[in-house]
Every structure is written in structure tokens, then in C-alpha cells.
Image (cartoon, rainbow, N blue to C red):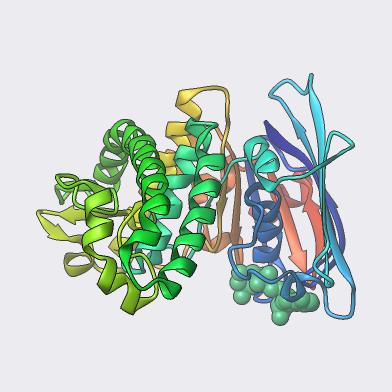
Amino acid sequence: MLLSQLNLHHFRNIANASLQPARGINLLTGNNGSGKTSLLEAIHCLGYGRSFRSHRASRIIRHGESAYVLFGRLSDEDAATELAIGMERSRSGVSQLKIGGQSADSLAALARLLPVQLIDPQGGELLSGGPKLRRSFIDWGVFYQDNSFHPLWKQFSRLLKQRNAQLKQSRGYQALGFWDQELTRISEEIAEKRAEYCEGFFSQAVDFIGFFLPEYEVSLDYYQGWDHEKSLGELLQANFERDRVLGYTSTGAHKADLRLKANGVPVCDILSRGQLKLMVCAMRLAQGCYLSAQGDKKVIFLIDDFASELDSEKRHLLMERLQQSDSQIFVTAIDLDHLDPELVARADKMFHVEHGRISEISRSVRASDEC
Ligand SMILES: Nc1ncnc2c1ncn2[C@@H]1O[C@H](COP(=O)(O)OP(=O)(O)OP(=O)(O)O)[C@@H](O)[C@H]1O
Ligand SMILES: [Mg+2]
């Protein structure tokens, strides 16, 4: 589904805004600090359940206000079906979610309706940062591919917490035997679902990465969180003393990672910062397109600060792939000169952001500017 209406209330520096995005390319321009990233952040909150900049609602709620409210209307391609979604978060920690006018109790339900992929200047962290980011990356795809993954992951997280608490108290391994049987069973199930996803997705990822970085031979490898030739149950028992000292469980599905190499070398040791960023662009595009190709779900791409660190040829390549994805796209830039001219020419709608106010730029104004 597409986002055909978006209303923001007390979100960052945006007091109130209402816009009707186009189904294709939406450009957002405005000076530093005007509110462009905030707008993408709002869409991300609706579709991902949380911001990409802060985990705390109090940071996002407009200064001096008590809550932010987001409202979206989702429509299918021909606008025959519409669904209203909403989210409210207060400083006191209370959140309310609504889907089709009814209260919804989980962010996952909202996320299923609105898959979003963010490509932003911090993107390179996916490859240069810790494994948690790469696990979330894989899990995003598994979440949409397999409905049973999310409840399984929640069950696993609860169990792991209990095991870690038990680990600190126990003197001998005996007390952990029960937790470990369950932890092993669920870890294996999670690992299998992730592996299944990676098996399908990796060829798409290699294809997209090859498009942006044709000079490298890239390989992706999924690490399940423990040596796959060993039994997790036995490893948990063997690592007991070490884990007890550490105070946490050092093997299992929560340690999974994605390992990427270019010409046989870990990507962070061989690629430049701009190339790492390009690679992340390719991976996120590939993941969005892979999801669309699997079924009826369309991904919304949020591209923040389009120009940053990409040369004009690469910007053009990114634009081409975005266009081919036939997705709804939101692109921000300080001004139109920072964007690929073809992207500007093909934009379906343009919005100008100024001090938190968002206004649509009509076609006639655009045409006279271009003259
Ligand atoms: N909770 C908040 N309440 C009010 N204003 C806020 C809040 N949090 C951040 N801001 C302000 O919102 C403004 C918009 O920030 P945003 O990151 O969206 O700007 P931007 O248009 O993306 O800028 P840039 O081009 O520099 O990336 C900033 O001036 C920031 O200080
Ligand atoms: Mg910004």
C-alpha cells in the first residue's frame, strides 16, 4: 500500500503539517534545520514503530508539548481500498496505535502495513558498526517473509533475559539445563528462518551491489551466532563458566551476523567511506525490491540527504534503480541543484520545508523556476 495522506502534529519542529504524497517520487527541499529529516522520521515511526534518530519519544515530541500524533492514510494502487493508521506518543510513555479506526496493540501490526527502507548519510554504519545493525537488517526481511518470526523472536528474547538472570545466581550448570533446552530449540528455529531468507535474498543483494560497485567481487555470508558444526546445547554448557563471569550468554541466535567481503577481504578493510555507503544503498534497495518481488507488499523508500558523498554518476545510478523499483519514494535535499536532474524532471510531487512548515510546490512554479 502507498501513503496517500500524512498528518503530523507536534513532531520535532513540525507543529502541524498535512500532505498528500504522490505514489511515485516525492522531493522535499529546504534549508538546514527546516524539518526534512523530521518528516522522513515521522514516516519511519509509522512504518517501523520507532525513529532512526532516537529511542526516546520525549526527544521527538515538539519542545513544550506533551505528545506527538501521526496519522496516515494508506491506499492501494488504484485507491480502491483505503486504511487509516495513527500513532500517538506522550512524554509520560503512553502510546496509542490505531488501524482502521480500531485500537491496535502491537507495532508489528502497523509495520506489516507500511514497510519502509531508509537510505541516509549514516548508512555506512550498517557495515562499519556492530553486528546488531546487521541482525536488524536481516530480521527486517525475515519479519515480512515469515509471520511466525516475530513472536518467536519475542519468546527468544524473554528466555534469554531469564537465562542471563539465572546465570548470575547459579553456582553450577544444573540449574540452567531447562533454559538451555528451550534456548537451543528456539535459536535453531530462528537460525533456520534467517538462513532461508538469506538464501533467497543474497543473490538479489549481489546483483544490486554489482550494479553500483562493478569493480569488486562481493560475497555475503550469514553467521547464525554459533559454529554450525557444533550443537548449541553443548556449546552453552561448555561456555557456562565463561558466561557466568561475563554475566551474559555469549552464543545463540542473538549473536548472528552478516559478513560481507569484497574481493575476499572484509568490506570495511577495503572499501572507501563513499563505497561503503553505496554498498548499503544497494543492500537496502535490494531488500526493498526483494520484498516487493515476493508478494503484494510495496516498500516506501526514504532517501535522506540524497547528495551526500555520492558522485554524480552514482547518484544517477541510484536514481535509475529507484525508478525501476516502481515504489513510493521520498527524497530530501537542501535544494534541487543537489539532485540528479533526471530525478527532478521525473518527480511526481515537490514539497518545500521551511521552519517546520511544509508546502507543496505546484507544477507551474516549478516550470517557471526551470525557465
Ligand atoms: N523535539 C523537538 N522539538 C522542536 N524542535 C526540534 C526537536 N528536535 C529537533 N528539533 C529541531 O528540528 C529542526 C529540524 O531538524 P531536521 O533534522 O528535520 O532538519 P533538516 O531539514 O533535515 O536539516 P538538515 O538539512 O541539516 O539535515 C532542527 O532545527 C532541530 O533543532
Ligand atoms: Mg536532515
Identified at 51% across, 41% down, the residue is 152
Of all residues shown, which one is farthest toward the left?
264
- Please state the horizontal and vertical placement of residue 63, each as a whole percent of the image: 83, 79
Q: Nearer the viewer, residue 326 or 118?
A: 118
Can residue 194 be seen here? The reply is: yes
Where's the N terminus, which quadrant? Answer: top right
Left or right of residue 281: residue 250: left
Q: Nearer the viewer, residue 258 or 74?
A: 258
Can residue 223 be seen here? The reply is: no
Left or right of residue 112: residue 359: right
Number of numbered discs on residues = 0
Left or right of residue 48: residue 237: left
- Please state the horizontal and vertical placement of residue 76, each as a whole percent of the image: 71, 25
Q: Nearer the viewer, residue 308 or 232?
A: 232
Identified at 85% across, 33% down, the residue is 100
View quadrant of ligand 2: bottom right
Identified at 74% across, 60% down, the residue is 352
Left or right of residue 17: residue 215: left
Q: Is residue 366 shown above or below 176?
A: above
Q: Is residue 89 shown above or below 198?
A: below
Identified at 40% across, 61% down, the residue is 175
- Please state the horizontal and vertical placement of residue 253, each as a whole percent of the image: 36, 51
